[in-house]
Image: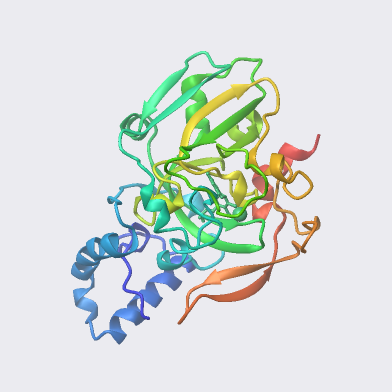
Amino acid sequence: MVLIRILPSWAIPEREVTPPSVYYNRRRFLKGAIAAGIGATLLPTLGCQDRSISSAKLASGTKPLEASPNPQFTDAGRPLTAEAIASRYNNFYEFGGTKSIWQAAQALPTENWKVEVGGLVKNPRTYDLDDLRRKFPQEERIYRFRCVEAWAMVVPWIGFPMRSLLADVEPTDRAKFVRFTSYYDSQVTPGPGFHLGSLPWPYTEGLRIEEMANDLAFFATGIYGHTLPKQHGAPIRMVIPWKYGFKGAKSIVKIEFLAERPATFWNTLVPSEYGFEANVNPNKPHPRWSQATERIVSDGPAISWERQPTLPYNGYGESVAALYTG
Ligand SMILES: Nc1nc2c(c(=O)[nH]1)N[C@H]1C(S)=C(S)[C@@H](COP(=O)(O)O)O[C@H]1N2
Ligand SMILES: [Mo]
């Protein structure tokens, strides 16, 4: 199937710089458009119409979200993953134990969402989505994404760096860790449908404060030029690009600053397989598989896979390695 995609903000012609990944995607878009018999002069209009078509088809319930690209993160060194792939291949165990949970996830109720921030902070706050978007300017960042299961994508997130939130709530000197809690309601989130004993719901994740303060640590409220679809963790989720994907908890309702390291979902369930730190590391195999290479989820006639070497810290070592010298 030729993907008629949105013309996303990073492909708008007036952008001065066109990094290779953008060029690649634009070219692919053009090829698709030409194959469909659409003249190049019609593209800007098509772009607009197409955005609404694609919102309906690819990202139900989302709204366009404006954000300027952060020039530091416009080229992830690999082609961007097509939205039709990224939004149909997800992990969200609250809604099922397979990669095909996008329809089940539409049951997530996101109206009047609140994020409660408290614990060891000077300014405990409860934000709604408008507060978050008003207080913390939204930007777009294209990041590599690496799941512990050894598959990888490249995703254009919209959101804000976690350190903006730190500046607003001001953790006290006693705060050393932070716990993030995902939405959970047993009436709405049936779980994976297989039983690993009882699961430690709600899904929680944790970071050291210094990790949260790193410029790369990000809260995403959007993706591919619009608000997050539910399967990606609407309306706000974590993105920690140098760690395995499970560290990025979805649909965050609570953030707590703590003196001690918190228990987390996967680390509680299988501590031997899912460490607390979980930095992407080609030299540290998962007990059941190698992490030396990864499968790139890419689009073609169907999902295709291509193996690449895994990069230490998922390629972000320059920014984060200093956090782990101690
Ligand atoms: N609440 C919650 N967050 C979660 C998960 C989950 O099951 N529940 N899965 C994690 C895993 S294993 C991965 S790889 C990513 C997948 O994110 P994506 O589906 O948006 O690509 O979400 C992470 N965050
Ligand atoms: Mo994952």
From the top left corner, tell me how far across and down residue 118 is, in percent. Answer: 51, 20
Give the image quadrant in which the ligand numbered 2 is located: bottom right
Position of residue 60 in the picture relative to residue 246 (left or right): left
Position of the N terminus, as image quadrant, is: bottom left
Position of the C terminus, as image quadrant, is: top right
Position of residue 269 in the picture relative to residue 116 (left or right): right
The residue sitting at 45% across, 52% down in the picture is: 232
Q: How is the image coloured?
A: rainbow
Residue furthest toward the top? 122
Residue 170, above or below 296: above
The residue sitting at 48% across, 47% down in the picture is: 190
Residue 192, above or below 83: above
Camera-side residue: 155 or 100? 100
Camera-side residue: 298 or 167? 298
Residue 91, above or below 42: above
The residue sitting at 55% across, 62% down in the picture is: 153
Residue 83, above or below 32: above
- The answer, for residue 179, to whether it is visible in the render is yes
From the top left corner, tell me how far across and down residue 152 is, in percent. Answer: 59, 63
Camera-side residue: 288 or 317? 288
For the image, the number of numbered tags is: 0
From the top left corner, tell me how far across and down residue 268 is, in percent. Answer: 70, 39
From the top left corner, tell me how far across and down residue 220 is, in percent. Answer: 45, 44
- The answer, for residue 229, to whether it is visible in the render is no
The residue sitting at 72% across, 55% down in the picture is: 312
